[in-house]
Amino acid sequence: MFRAAATTIVFMLDRPWLHDFVLLLLRLTLTLVVGAQGYQIFFGHGVKESSRVLAKWGMPNAYPFTVVLGLALVLCAVGILLGFLTPLFAIIGAVAEAGYGYFLMTGGHYGFTTSSAQMTCLVVVSLLALMVLGAGRVSTDAVLNAHAE
């Protein structure tokens, strides 16, 4: 009984349009989250204040890293939104988020039980999943690949 129900559920989920919809939803969500973080660095707190916080957390050369972090997050958000070079922008965003998360948890003394640390880990894992799975058929990558063949 359980096996038949599990097989039915797997069969129902094995739809190409459903995969594309979920990948599009993942891309849109990551665009909002990562883009908001990059926006916050440049226009929310500002680069100077953000770099001051990162320096307090133990980041050496905090100002240049803050600029690079903000640019990486904004470019990642734009690339993922458009679905253009998605694996490349996803890994750039994952590395930037992982670097931020490292200083958040070690220097900022935010343990893994805090929502900030957990969200950072979820964003990194989601970006890695997007890197592996690609952008789906609703993306610039898919259009360019279709014309290349």
Image (spheres, helix red, strand yellow):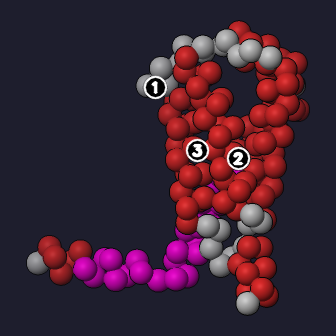
The amino acid type of the residue labelled 2 equals Ile
Residue at image point 65% right, 50% down: 91
Mark 3 belongs to which amino acid?
Val
Indicate the amino acid at tag 1.
Phe
How far is mark 1 from mark 3, CA to CA?
A: 14 Å
Residue tagged 1? 112
Task: Give the residue displayed 66% in from the left and 60% down from the top.
Answer: 87
Query: Is disc 1 placed on a helix, strand or loop?
Result: loop
The residue carrying mark 2 is 92
In what element is the residue under mark 3?
A: helix
Going from the N terminus, do you reach mark 2 or mark 1 first? 2
* Res 53 visible: no
Residue at the far top: name it. 56
Residues shaded magenta? 7-33
Q: Earlier in the sequence, mark 2 or mark 3?
A: 2
Question: What crowding class fits label 2: few (fewer than 14 Cα within 10 Å), some (14-19), or many (20 or more)?
Answer: many
Residue furthest toward the front? 149
Q: Quadrant of residue 82?
A: bottom right
What is the count of numbered marks?
3
Residue under label 3: 123
- Residue 137 x, y percent position in the rendering: 65, 79
Question: Could you give the CA–CA distance between mark 2 and mark 3, rounded to whole angstroms?
Answer: 12 Å
Q: Is residue 109 above or below residue 121?
A: above
Quadrant in the picture for the C terminus: bottom right
Q: Is residue 16 visible?
A: yes
* Numbered disc 2: secondary structure: helix
